[in-house]
Amino acid sequence: MSDSEDYQDFEDDDEFETASDHSSAEEGSKELPSHIEEQFIIRDLDTGRVINLLEDSATENLAAPLTRISQLREISKTPVSPIIPGRRIPVSKKGIRAPVITAIQELQTIREHVGPVWSLARSADSSQIASGGRDQILRIWDVGNIITPASTHIGHTADILDITWSTGGRLITASSDGTARLWTAGQEGPVETLAHPAHVMSADIHPADPQCVVTASADGVVRLIDVGSKRVLAKGAAPGMPTVVRFCPSGGRVVVGTVTGHLKVLDGASLAPLASWAKQSAGCVAGLVVPDDNTIIASSGDSRIRVFSGDTFICRQTYAGHSTKTTVARPSVSADGRLLCSGSDKASVFMWPMNSGVKGCLRFRIDGPAVSTILLGNPTDEMGGVMLVTGDEDGTMRLFGRGSV
């Protein structure tokens, strides 16, 4: 197949409570297990039931078969795979006339996750990344010339679907076990566990207030939650099922994407609708990047990444070339906003120079479909400063960089 053929043209007083909120004297409760397992005791606030995610068969509709903590701990102690000497991979281009990199190196291959790596996130200073997916383990990595393990965090009992990292250093994860959990690097278990009545598809932390989070769950509800008081401050509805949610950098607005191809901008305090865009043929909105208050970047099931004005939802530019018809692929933007990248179900990584008026793309092949990507560093004019990490369907993470012109 030629290269050209591969380019595809609750109420407001609802409360979230965790194990620490329940004493053993509470009516109908059992004595709590050891501190290692306390994180699995949650309360479904829509029903008021206290649930042990490790034992309660009623949670089967929320989670995949549960893995015991001992098994998770053994997995999390597996050493990082040896560094594979840089494999030089050709980079092809389409629609770009300027000199750009012609090759990139695979600097490191890491096989520590089991199953798809659904989400990757980078810290505010890009010195660390976080990864999570099918194996339920949140891993944090230090980033230098290579990736080295920093910590592992256990608590979820089903797939980690989404990870975001606040400017203050906290992380939040969303999971199909029906919880969103907050974490810090110095604590193995979660700082807080927020139980929901359905899969939590996505979550984000307010950029100015780390005690305020927003979640999107499979019951069709977007919730704004005050973590300190454990109260739901506001609710918003999304057509179909929300799949991804993000705060704008100022925190004044929330952007939501749905499985039916809808995008909505909601007020950051009340979750009242402000603007919307819909295209049913676009398919599921799988990824959102909101680099500034007036820019929304959304990837969808029709193998398109669209850049919208945040105020009017006018589509300023559409990027194409990759294919996401058989897999999820979430985009990433470099810290300086100059480069956009995404995986593809054709076992390739695509990169698009942004803010240049050019719709052309760069592409290099990898060994399997990449469902998540994260860009590190800032590219030069020739894209020679590119460093990126991919998370694959088989659990492999790969570090690429040192492109040559």
Image (spheres, rainbow, N blue to C red):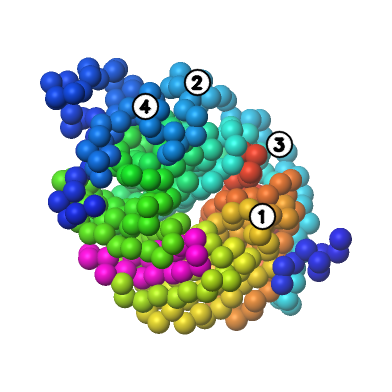
Magenta stretch: give its range: 254-272
Under mark 1, the amino acid is Thr
Q: Residue at x 47, y 28 (%)?
A: 66
Under mark 2, the amino acid is Gln
Q: Which residue is labeled 4 in the image? A: 56
Under mark 3, the amino acid is Ile
Give the camera-side residue of 16 and 403.
16
- Image mark for residue 84: 3
Q: Quick check: 214 left or right of 307? A: left
Give the camera-side residue of 220 and 149.
220
Q: Nearer the viewer, mark 4 or mark 3?
A: 4
Tell me the distance, in whole angstroms, between the alpha carbons under discs 4 and 3: 43 Å
Q: Where residue 388 sits: x, y (%)? A: 59, 52
Image vertical order of residue 134 relative to residue 98, above or below: above
Closer to the chain start, of discs 1 and 2, is: 2
Q: Which residue is labeled 2 in the image? A: 71
Q: Quick check: 378 left or right of 208? A: right
Q: Quadrant of the C terminus?
A: bottom right
Closer to the chain start, of discs 3 and 2, is: 2
Q: Quick check: 33 left or right of 311? A: left
Are there few (<14), some (14-19), or many (20+) residues within 10 Å of tag 1? few
Image vertical order of residue 270 relative to residue 66, above or below: below
Image vertical order of residue 48 relative to residue 356, above or below: above
Are there few (<14), some (14-19), or many (20+) residues within 10 Å of tag 4? few
Closer to the chain start, of discs 1 and 3, is: 3
Q: Nearer the viewer, mark 4 or mark 1?
A: 4
Q: Mark 1: which secondary structure?
A: loop
| Residue ranking furthest to the right | 1
